[in-house]
């Protein structure tokens, strides 16, 4: 913008100054009227602090996790429930005689009035920083606003305490039930292992090596008895056939029987007594002995034996009978040992299963007992208020000044709006005026460059028309200013108090004495 244009618009503004003053005064009066019409709104605020646990988690770990902010958010959701908001409105008479007809309007309005603000949420893990929760409520009655905030704070603190105590109690009850159930299961597992061991005491894997040793000893004893039996039978055959006390081979049959017995001794040194090779040789010896015995007894019956020979044969028969009995006992023992050895792997498998079940139950029982101990400590921490908890940092007080309407901002906005509106009106009037006032307008319209321009010559100031207009404008401005002062004095602040404050701000000493009085 060139200097000529700027001077022109300044001249237009000065010339149209009454319009600017009137529009500004009208907007200011409208703002004052708006301030007078809008009802005051008071906000009561309370501050809740989140306190860290008083006992170090390393010494006593609480069973309730540090999710207090999450619980507060859940409590906030409960406060905003439809039924709770309606009960709150009825309990404190928030709307009085101006209760909205629709419940939905009440709920929407209360949700806008109740405010929850979380401060320093990110620093909850830092013990040196404080996490606070601000609870606020807006209402036209300051006492009701404070009462509602006090009620909301009580609800938050009580619900938080009850939830933490209930959670700690539920945790303790769970671990007590778990420990009791696992204790019974552990006793049952011990009884099952004891019963199984008693039922299979001869086949337990712990005694497997001992039973292997017993079987080896029984087999060696059986081999010894077989050898002794073979020798006794040979001697008896010799006595029956020859009638002499010394064993000699009197025939081919005696030689064959001796070879079979020696073959049996050789195989017993290599194979077990139950081996098929050993059993085959024994069957052959037994068959041959039965045949020779029958022949010997028949021959012996045909002749008279000497007394000494009869005594020897009786001793041999007695020893053979004892050997047969001992062999039968050893055979039964070997069968029992073999049966127990055979069933030992199955017994070991079942015993391992029972042992694993016992160890698993014991581990779970120990964990449950440890959890029960920790839950007991956690319940005591919550009962004594030593854990993380909410405390009232700043109680709600009855507010003294309203938060709405913001009078200064409204007055400033109305002043700026009046000035802006006046400028717009002046610009529109000047743009719609078709008269030529500047050389630039003449050049624009006619397309001709003027040789010279004659400046505007105002009419004499003392003309009646100008006097009447000036008087009317002045009267209107004074009247509006007086009305504005009256409105400010009655609705906003007394003029004498405002004057004293202004004088005190300037620094006059007597103004300070007046304010103190």
Image (cartoon, rainbow, N blue to C red):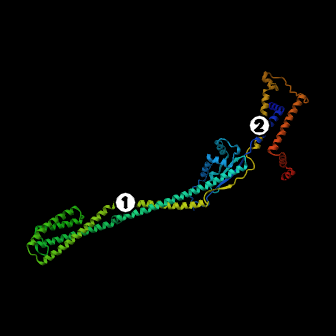
Tell which residue pokes out farthest to the bottom in this image: 308
Q: According to the image, label 1 marks what residue?
A: 350
Residue at image point 81% right, 44% down: 490
Residue 348 shows in the view: yes
Looking at the image, which is closer to me, 56 or 49? 49
Residue at x 39%, y 60% (from the top left corner): 352
Asked whether residue 254 appears in the rendered view, the answer is: no
Residue 4, image x, y percentages: 81, 30
Which picture quadrant has residue 211? bottom left
Q: Is residue 88 left or right of residue 2?
A: left
Residues at badges 1 and 2 in contact (C-beta under 8 Å)? Answer: no
- Give the left or right position of residue 453, taking residue 287 as reference: right
As helix, strand or loop, the secondary structure at mark 2 comes to: helix
The residue sitting at 19% across, 74% down in the picture is 318
* Image quadrant in which the N terminus is located: top right
Mark 1 surroundings within 10 Å by alpha-carbon count, few (fewer than 14), some (14 through 19), many (20 or more): some
Q: Which residue is mark 2?
A: 417
**Residue lying farthest left?**
302
Name the residue located 55 percent from the left edge and 61 percent from the top edge: 376
Residue that extends furthest to the right in the rendered view of this protein: 462
- Residue 34 percent location from the top left of the image: 76, 40
Q: In terms of depth relative to the viewer, which is nearer, 248 or 35?
A: 35
Q: Quadrant of residue 229?
A: bottom left
Image location (x, y in percent) of residue 421: 77, 34
Secondary element under disc 1, as helix, strand or loop, is helix
> Considering only vertical position in the picture, is 284 above or below 10?
below
């Amino acid at each position: 913008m060139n200097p000529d244009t700027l001077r022109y618009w300044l001249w237009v503004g000065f010339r149209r100054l009454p319009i600017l003053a009137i529009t500004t005064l009208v907007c200011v009066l409208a703002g004052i009227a708006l301030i007078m019409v809008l009802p005051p709104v008071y906000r009561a605020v309370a501050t809740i602090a989140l306190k860290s646990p008083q006992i170090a988690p390393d010494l006593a770990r609480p069973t309730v996790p540090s999710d207090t902010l999450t619980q507060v958010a859940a409590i906030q959701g409960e406060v905003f429930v439809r039924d709770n908001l309606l009960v709150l409105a009825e309990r404190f008479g928030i709307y009085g005689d101006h209760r909205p007809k629709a419940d939905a309007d009440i709920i929407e309005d209360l949700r806008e009035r109740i405010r929850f603000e979380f401060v320093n949420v990110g620093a909850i893990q830092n013990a040196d920083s404080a996490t606070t929760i601000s609870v606020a409520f807006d209402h036209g009655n300051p006492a009701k606003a404070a009462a509602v905030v006090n009620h909301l704070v009580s609800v938050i603190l009580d619900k938080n305490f009850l939830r933490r105590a209930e959670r700690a109690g539920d945790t303790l009850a769970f671990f007590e039930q778990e420990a009791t159930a696992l204790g019974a299961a552990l006793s049952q597992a011990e009884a099952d292992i004891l019963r199984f061991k008693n039922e299979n005491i001869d086949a337990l894997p712990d005694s497997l090596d001992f039973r292997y040793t017993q079987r080896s000893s029984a087999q060696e004893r059986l081999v010894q008895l077989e050898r002794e039996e073979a020798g006794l039978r040979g001697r008896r055959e010799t006595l029956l056939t020859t009638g002499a006390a010394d064993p000699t081979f009197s025939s081919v049959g005696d030689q064959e029987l001796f070879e079979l017995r020696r073959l049996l001794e050789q195989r017993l040194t290599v194979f077990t007594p139950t081996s098929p090779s050993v059993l085959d040789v024994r069957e052959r010896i037994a068959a041959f002995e039965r045949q020779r015995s029958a022949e010997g007894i028949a021959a012996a019956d045909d002749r008279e034996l000497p007394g000494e020979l009869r005594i020897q044969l009786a001793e041999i028969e007695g020893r053979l009978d004892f050997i047969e009995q001992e062999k039968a006992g050893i055979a039964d023992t070997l069968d029992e040992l073999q049966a127990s050895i055979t069933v030992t792997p199955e017994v070991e498998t079942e015993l391992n299963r029972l042992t694993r079940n016992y160890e698993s139950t014991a581990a779970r029982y120990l964990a449950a007992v440890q959890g029960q101990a920790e839950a007991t400590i956690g319940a005591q921490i919550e009962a004594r208020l030593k854990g993380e908890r909410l405390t009232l940092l700043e109680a709600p007080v009855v507010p003294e000044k309203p938060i709405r309407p913001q009078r200064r901002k409204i007055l400033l906005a109305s002043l700026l709006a009046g000035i802006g509106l006046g400028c717009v009106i002046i610009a529109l009037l000047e743009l719609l005026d078709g008269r030529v006032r500047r050389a630039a307008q003449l050049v624009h319209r006619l397309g001709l460059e003027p040789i010279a321009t004659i400046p505007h010559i105002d009419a004499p100031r003392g003309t009646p028309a100008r006097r009447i207009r000036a008087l009317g404008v002045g009267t209107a401005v004074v009247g509006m200013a007086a009305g504005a002062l009256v409105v400010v004095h009655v609705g906003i602040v007394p003029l004498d108090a405002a004057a004293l404050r202004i004088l005190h701000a300037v620094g006059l000493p007597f103004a300070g004495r007046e304010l103190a009085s």
